[in-house]
């Protein structure tokens, strides 16, 4: 069993006192200590608007008192639905000051998904971003009878709606300000009320993404989040000078910790982009010092860099290739403080001027002190690319039930195939079954209205089953193999770890997603989704005409490209004794992109394996019955909610296997 070191904040005014155990209490502390420091920014109509900590405190107090006047009370659940907006973050703290519990919901959820969460959580109030979300909530009023009031931020399009139970954010806040003006003692009463809050109180309820069924409401206390936030800040020496970009879903635990828990406990500034379409531009303008992104974001940025380099002139490409060779050779060593020859250091400095610096500036990562990726495995080549540029990118392993942090990579101990050592105050062990288990101050209180699931996930003495299979390496770092329930065997006894195979395929920029099958079968078969951006750029350069994703995915040259990638993965697997028996025998390119709206992915973009196995049963059958093609009809959901059907004849290709360095049987012996 491994245990993370206990750490304590020292020497920084940003460390909120240990007695401040709820976010409303920390808010008042920050308003006094940081006063005029910028706490939040939001880009609106191309201009960054700013709020100081003292200003944020006033905004939250007025809105909180306004909510009380509408009838929100301690214990009530209040849904938060929308993109990253300062007012939505403030709304959560305003509700917490009353003793109510915020329930952030994925803004892109279809009405059925949202209705389940709101109904299960028994929400009384909902605070939403705009008309789209208002319409969605009004359409489910019969399914969520507990919902009494809906409050919206953007007023556009809502003037002629029935406002009996519909309110603008500004009007609620104005009501709070008016009540304060009428009673000189109201401010003090409000502060006295929030002072009664305790660290053990429920701070937020976050619903899991539901890869194996209905999402579960994870109840997290203030202690869970405040202690985890402070430990995360301490681990990476984050203070009030940091800048972060809040762009990930507010319903995801990562955003909740990075953009609220750590922001409040450190006192740093949270920046909200204008829209999802302007994130790249907004990131360049802010240049965050602390940056988190799932692997797909880093993969997409790298894909765009490589696509642009393909279109660059010969001289520019030669300079890029030359200095990237230097970066691959010594970049990580310089970042880790290792010894590097003077000649290589000088070449690296030239590379910083001509290539690395401009690249980091283009990505908006010029000032990045530390960056993290998590959620899925990131390809070693992709990971090395960013670190070779001098970017301190690290991996962590976490869960909603852990308030994010289970393991972290310490500076100087960064390995592409591991996810780090136990985070501060975290105990880690591997069960006899091979499952990773942990215990920490961040461990969730329980699942809302689901004692059975709580008991099966959390032991009486506080250990949590992660559902992931892993090993602890000799250096004390954790290595995740796959989801424990997904690790299986082929009929010949060979180990089958689907995610391990899928991640190897996704290392290629042309492959966006992959789903492997093989448990209790005689061979491994794979579905592949191409990356439309990368493959589309290739098609443009090679004069390949196509009218749709479906047409491009079926193109013979695209199949040949993916076939070469699958063959390379098989060669890599052949060199790994325990995985050599799981080489890919057959593959196909799906005729459509896997989509959360079609139920194939979760809202955090994780593959719903069992759903896909059921939905694409005929294609799986074709992988194993020797068919060369298979005609399929697939129902799809369009962005406006309409249903449609895609028809296609999908090609299935056979792959050669490569001799293993050592057979599976020999390795097992």
Image: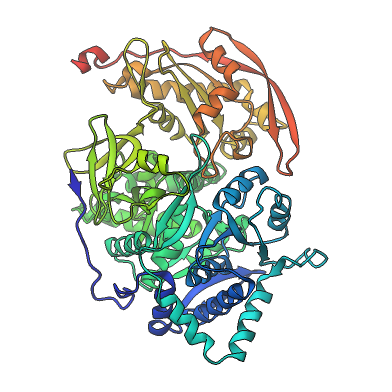
Residue at image location 61% in from the left, 33% down from the top? 593
- On the image, the x and y values in percent for residue 382 come to 40, 42
Residue at image location 62% in from the left, 76% down from the top? 69
Of residue 300 and residue 183, the one placed in the foreground of this image is: 183
The residue lying furthest to the bottom in this view is 184
Of residue 427 and residue 444, the one placed in the foreground of this image is: 444
Tell me where residue 545 sits by quadrant: top right
Judge whether residue 130 can be spotted in this image.
Answer: yes
Q: Quadrant of the C terminus?
A: top left
- Left or right: where 17 falls relative to 562: left
- Left or right: where 638 falls relative to 48: right
- On the image, the x and y values in percent for residue 349 come to 33, 58
- On the image, the x and y values in percent for residue 484 come to 35, 31
Q: Is residue 269 above or below residue 628?
A: below
Q: Quadrant of the N terminus?
A: top left
- On the image, the x and y values in percent for residue 130 come to 69, 61
Q: How many marks?
A: 0
């Amino acid at each position: 069993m491994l245990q993370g070191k206990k750490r304590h904040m020292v020497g920084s005014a940003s460390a909120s006192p240990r007695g401040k155990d709820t976010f409303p209490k920390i808010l008042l502390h920050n308003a006094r200590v940081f006063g005029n420091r910028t706490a939040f920014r939001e880009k609106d109509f191309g201009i960054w608007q700013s709020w100081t900590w003292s200003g944020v405190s006033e905004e939250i107090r007025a809105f909180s008192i306004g909510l009380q006047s509408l009838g929100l009370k301690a214990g009530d659940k209040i849904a938060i639905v929308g993109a990253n907006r300062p007012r939505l973050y403030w709304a959560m703290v305003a509700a917490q000051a009353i003793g109510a519990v915020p329930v952030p919901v994925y803004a892109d959820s279809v009405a059925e998904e949202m209705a389940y969460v709101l109904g299960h959580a028994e929400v009384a109030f909902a605070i939403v971003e705009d008309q789209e979300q208002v319409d969605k909530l009004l359409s489910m009023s019969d399914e969520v009878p507990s919902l009494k009031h809906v409050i919206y931020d953007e007023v556009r399009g809502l003037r002629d709606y029935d406002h009996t139970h519909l309110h603008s954010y500004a009007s609620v806040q104005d009501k709070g300000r008016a009540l304060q003006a009428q009673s000189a003692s109201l401010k003090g009463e409000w502060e006295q009320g929030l002072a009664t809050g305790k660290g053990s109180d429920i701070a937020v309820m976050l619903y899991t993404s539901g890869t194996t069924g209905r999402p579960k409401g994870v109840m997290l206390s203030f202690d869970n989040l405040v202690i985890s936030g402070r430990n995360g800040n301490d681990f990476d020496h984050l203070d009030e000078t940091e800048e972060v970009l809040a762009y990930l879903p507010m319903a995801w635990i990562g955003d909740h910790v990075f953009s609220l828990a750590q922001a409040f406990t450190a006192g740093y500034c949270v920046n909200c982009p204008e829209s999802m379409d302007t994130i790249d531009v907004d990131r360049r303008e802010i240049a965050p010092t602390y940056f988190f992104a799932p692997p797909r974001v880093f993969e997409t940025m790298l894909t765009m860099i490589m696509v642009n380099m393909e279109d660059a002139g010969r001289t520019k490409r030669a300079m890029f290739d030359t200095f990237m060779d230097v970066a691959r050779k010594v970049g990580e060593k310089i970042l880790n403080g290792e010894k590097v020859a003077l000649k290589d250091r000088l070449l690296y400095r030239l590379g910083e001027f001509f290539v690395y610096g401009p690249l980091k500036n283009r990505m908006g990562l010029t000032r990045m002190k530390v960056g993290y990726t998590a959620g899925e495995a990131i390809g070693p080549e992709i990971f090395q690319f960013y670190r070779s540029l001098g970017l301190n990118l690290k991996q962590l392993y976490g869960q909603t039930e852990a308030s994010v942090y289970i393991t972290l990579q310490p500076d100087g101990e960064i390995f592409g195939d591991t996810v780090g050592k136990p985070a501060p105050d975290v105990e880690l062990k591997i069960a006899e079954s091979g499952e990773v288990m942990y215990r920490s101050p961040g461990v969730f209180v329980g699942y809302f209205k689901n004692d059975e699931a709580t008991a099966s996930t959390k032991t009486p003495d506080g250990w949590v089953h992660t559902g992931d299979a892993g090993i602890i390496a000799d250096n004390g770092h954790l290595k995740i193999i796959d989801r424990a329930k997904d690790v299986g065997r082929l009929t010949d006894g060979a180990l089958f770890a689907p995610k391990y195979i899928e991640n190897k395929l996704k290392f290629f920029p042309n492959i966006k997603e992959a789903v492997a099958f093989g448990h209790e079968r005689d061979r491994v078969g794979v579905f592949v989704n191409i990356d439309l951006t990368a493959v589309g750029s290739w098609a443009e350069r090679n004069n390949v005409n196509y009218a749709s994703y479906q047409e491009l995915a079926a193109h013979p040259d695209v199949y040949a490209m993916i076939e070469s990638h699958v063959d390379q993965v098989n060669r890599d697997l052949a060199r790994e004794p325990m995985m050599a028996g799981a080489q890919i025998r057959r593959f196909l390119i799906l005729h459509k992109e896997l989509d959360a709206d079609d139920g194939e992915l979760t809202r955090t973009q994780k593959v719903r394996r069992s759903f896909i196995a059921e939905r694409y049963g005929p294609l799986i059958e074709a992988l194993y019955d020797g068919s060369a093609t298979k005609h399929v009809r697939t129902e799809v959901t369009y962005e406006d909610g309409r249903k449609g059907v895609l028809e296609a004849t999908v090609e299935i290709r056979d792959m050669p296997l490569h001799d293993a360095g050592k057979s599976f049987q020999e390795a097992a012996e």
